[in-house]
Image (cartoon, rainbow, N blue to C red):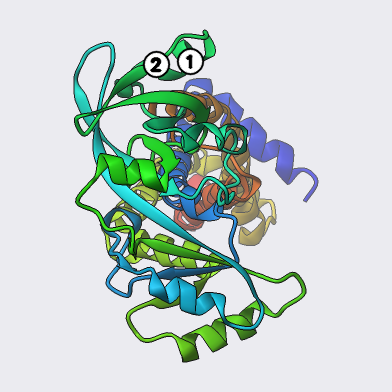
Amino acid sequence: MLLAIPLAWLQLARERVRLFVALAGIGFAVILMMMQLGFQEALFTAAVNFHVNLKTDIVLISPQTTTLFAIKNFSRRRLYQAAGVDGVESVSPLYLDFGLWRNPQTRKTRQLMIIGFDPSQAVFSLPGVADYLDRIKMPDVVLFDENSRPEYGAIAEQFKAGKTVSTEVSGRKITVGGLFQLGASFSADGNLITSDLNLLRLFPERNLGLIDIGLINVIPGKDISAVIAELKTLLPDDVLVLSKQGFVRFERNYWETSTTIGFIFTLGTLMGFIVGMVIVYQILYTDVSDHLAEYATLKAMGYKSRFLYTVVLQEAFILAVLGFIPGFALCLGLYKLVREGTSLPMLMTADRVITVFLLTLIMCIVSGVIAMRRVQAADPADIF
């Protein structure tokens, strides 16, 4: 067994061009799988970034709501009813809408999401929001998401340079009073935060008594699940009561199951797996065929077929490891490129690295198992 490992390596290294082609093919498969999984997770993470950064224990939404960009409003009275439930510490209404932002440099318009709430209540843990809450109390002052796409203009750069940034949102003049960080998502390529009163100034047809999301904080030490159960009993069926984690799952589940996104990226990962498996099989099959006489000689010397199978599997393992390393290294650069180009949270995680490495290993081993059939053709009688 100890001699099998160098034998496998020597057979692979003998044809260096073939080895290079094999590693390039495996590296390509690794890149394809890792990019597909990375894009999928980045899109899903971006979709729930808003939800994750809410400072709340319980969320009320309309049962007609399917996702954040198709949210339906409900009566603010439900929030007041919830405030009377034992264990509830505070409640906060949240308003969402979509307006047209005019790029102050190019004068082109682009849709973004506008979030409105009472500035006296800190409802977000997003970086930057807490620093500028007092400013959005002033009329027509907003906070701009500095992680928005560049099509909205160099707003963050101008603000940080000390310049006054003013433009129009849905035909109304506004002033940027601060920056925060949220990022682009399925719902919007850019975001604004302002007070609930400022949001109503932008959308005068809206009613302050109709809210989009209700936030409920529970007294520390109280059982959140018990409060949720009581709210479900008390409130009518025109509102849906969710925990914060349930709200996150609600949004993510929509994009995973009600759209083709999950299927598309899963199919892309599968295609990368199949492409890599075909490449590795061709390499191993050719290698075994080229050394068929040597395998037959080993059989004639008394080596069992199991030993020869082990050599092929070890070649598959070596290819998996050596092909994964350059593919992983290139993906680190590609992830950074995607982050900078799309503002998506494209981050390399340990779970993804392990998952793709295991897929690569399985891909190579399966190819090796298929290539073993060629070893069976190594008959000493054909040589002697």
Give the left or right position of residue 355, taking residue 222 as reference: left
Residue under label 2, please give it: 165
Choose between 240 and 80: the one closer to the eye. Answer: 80
Q: Which type of secondary structure does the marked residue at label 1 adopt?
A: helix
Q: Residue at x 47, y 43 (%)?
A: 38
Callout 2 amino acid: Val
Q: Position of residue 307 (x, y in %)?
A: 67, 55
> Quarter of the image holding residue 203?
top left
Inspect the image, locate mark 1, and give the three-letter code of the amino acid beneath it: Phe
Q: Which residue is mark 1?
A: 159
Circle 2: element type: loop
Residues marked 2 and 1 touching at CB (< 8 Å): yes
Q: On screen, 365 above or below 126?
A: below
Q: Is residue 210 left or right of residue 31?
A: left
In the image, residue 339 sits, relative to residue 263, either above or below, namely above
Along the line of sight, the residue nearer the viewer: 146 or 352: 146
Q: Residue at x 57, y 41 (%)?
A: 126
Q: Residue 63, relative to residue 300: is it above or below?
A: below
Classify 87 as above or below 369: below
View extreme (bottom): residue: 233
How many residues crowd mark 1 within 10 Å: few (<14), some (14–19), many (20+)?
some
- The span from disc 2 to disc 1 (Cα, nearest Å) is 6 Å
User: Is residue 179 toward the left or the right of residue 150 in the image?
Assistant: right
Sort mark 2 into few (<14), some (14-19) or many (20+) by Cα contacts within 10 Å: some
Disc 2 or 1, which lies upstream in sequence? 1
Q: Position of residue 221 (x, y in %)?
A: 77, 74
